[in-house]
Amino acid sequence: MLEISKAYNPKEVEDKIYEKWEKSGYFNPDNLPCQVDKKCKGIFSILMPPPNVTGTLHIGHAVMLALEDIMVRYHRMRKDKTLWLPGTDHAAIATQNVVEKKLKKEKGLRRHDLGREKFLEEVEKFIQASKDRIHLQIRKMGASCDWSREAYTLDEPRSKAVRTAFKILYDKGLIYRGSRIVNWCPHCSSTLADDEVEYKAQKAKFYTFKYSKDFPFPIATTRPETKLGDTAVAVNPNDGRYKKYIGKTYEVDFVGIPLKLKIIADKSIDPTFGTGALGVTPAHSMVDWLMAEKNNLQIVKVIDEQGRIMPGFAEYSGKTTIEAREIIIKKLRESGLIEKEEEIENNLSLCYRCGTPVEPLPSLQWFIDVDKPFKFSASKHSPLVGVKDGQEVTLKFLMEHVVKSGQIKIIPEHFTKVYFEWINNLRDWCISRQIWFGHRIPVYYCDKCKDVDISKFNVQDSKFKITIQNSKLGIVSVDELKKCPFCDGQLEQDPDTLDTWFSSGLWTFSTLGWPEKTSDFEVFHPTSVLETGYDILFFWIARMILMSTALLGEIPFRVVYLHGLVRDMQGRKMSKSLGNVIDPLDMILKYGADAVRVSLFIGTSAGTDVKLNEQKIAGYRNFANKIWNAARFVLMNLDGIPNKPKKFNASDKKIISELQTTVERITNYLDKFDFNHAGDLAYHYFWHTFCDKIIEEQKPRFKDLAERQSAQYLLFTILTTCLKILHPFMPFVTEAIWQVLPRKEESLLMAEEWPEKNIF
């Protein structure tokens, strides 16, 4: 008779078990028994989506950690050489915002009061404290990642990868600097990418008015203040009301500001919306900017980077957009030019970081051209199917091709259509940000070499790329430069930083040592799967595909698995204001990590949101206790390691067959990334088949000496098999039981072999 404690207490065992796992070295694929014995069956690699170093992890991160650890533990037990590489993201604009708020609250200081260098020192202090909290939370969830390979998007290896990637893309002609309309956040004082803009439904005033009494027809808008920069009016070419005006130009006095308006035709104009005539403000609308390019219109910037009216607009200059709007509407009313005022529903564009209304405005920035043809460089390591070396392609084509051809599979499949729709509407990616924290753009300017003749310099592309930027010599370099290599003059580095998604877009290969040639890259890239939330399909996943295909000529991963968002039981997003936020650490302390993990995926399929409350977590705590109590019963009825009986009766054979079928079904579900059905089947088999039926049926056999051995062996084998199939889902309780089982030699359950056929 073997004894274990009467009750399972996660708080007493989880930290000790995790420490035991770490000390074993098995988180590192180089130390796995199958690697040491050279008997690994395959390769499985996954990169942890790097949490932002802006604070603690939330319940959404817990979903990611649970699902990825299931995959990793499963493949490790399948004897694959398994790598799960962890890391964190510097999250440039988000981190800077957090630290700026902290400085303002605690010291009453702005970043400009400290200066760039001192401010970045404050950022580093914050980051280190944040990293420590994140590491603790990842360990508490039981994540069996390889800490020896941990990466950070702003560490030196990743920084070199960023500089190298920038230069390669620049050399290919895919990165350029130009003045284009961008999304500008007045609060962050920085640009935003198109998919960093959020939209909030609101009620807005819709004004129908004439520019002046002598203008032939009215227009309609929700933003009269932008009309100060109108240079045209667009109508649909098939709209009979306006055909006679197309091509004409009108000079008007709009509330004291002279405008020269050309009437242009554009098929995109909806004749049924408003008056069917659109005032074209090229400087403050992407749609209008494109019309201006087609029609060679003047660009007049009205709103500045602080969200105020630019100089040169009389009494409106210096006013906020709202203040200017009120003055304009008052003047239009007084002049009798307003024909109608109505309330409509529209979308307000907001910065996804701070919630400030975004201003579209023209700005000199760095961009990646997604439509420019370039010669594709094929990978010898893992070549793409259907694209030849030297073939002319665009980034858009590559991003679409690898998914359309099935080289990258997206789970669930319906997100594939969403991905293609996004690609079709993709515009050039603005990669520069006007913030201090992040990767500085690796371009250096020399004032001394003005109006230089580039052709006279014999420069190797592998070292420099030189160009002229605003009459300055611009040098693109992977290595940091202090002095101009041509005139020995002082260099000034571009003050802007790169969009944080630029560096995280390199994640699958920068973490494996690129641009150096490393064995990790040779073995583990392309990675097996990318698991993350569906909400960053465009933020991150698409950019990883862009970077990998452009820079390496290969895919970054073979499968994309998208999990849903965590909501409360009413389907609401979790927020502090609603009081429905669940802290994973609080739940782990109360119910144990296993209960938290299982509650996050059972009952939820890929791409669907998770409904969660504390009662659900408590229910799976009861399951952990059930596993413990069942193991305790089996152990209390053992005399040691049970011997296999010479033969099984018909009832035993039926039980054995059902177990083997169950294991095969769970294996099949896991191979298809169906964690919900795999976990649910393991749960129901253990509780309702093993505990409720098999154990109860076997109890009388322990009283019969002839039957005792068969009952002991049957229950012990089912228990050990169940511990193995439950381990990826509930690693702590299963490992805790494994450590007290009678065994011929010590071992860790995490390194045991997954049960295959012929379990008995």
Image (cartoon, rainbow, N blue to C red):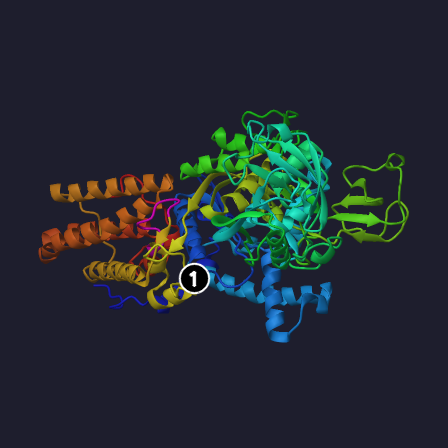
Q: Which residue is mark 1?
A: 575
Q: Is residue 561 left or right of residue 276?
A: left
Residue stretch rendered in magenta on the structure: 599-608
Residue found at the far bottom of this picture: 107
Picture coordinates of residue 219, whole percent (x, y): 58, 42
Which quadrant of the rendered structure holds the N terminus? bottom left
Near-viewer residue (717 or 140)? 140
Q: Residue at x 37, y 39 (%)?
A: 671
Numbered label tally: 1
On screen, residue 401 versus residue 257, left or right, reads left
Depicted 576 relative to depicted 371: above or below: below
Magenta: main secondary structure equals: loop
| For residue 29, side relative to residue 468 (left or right) | left
Judge left or right: residue 154 versus residue 735. right
Q: Nearer the viewer, residue 401 or 227?
A: 227
Residue type for callout 1: Ser
Circle 1 residues within 10 Å: few <14, some 14–19, many ≥20: few
Q: Residue at x 26, y 51 (%)?
A: 683
Q: Is residue 552 visible?
A: no
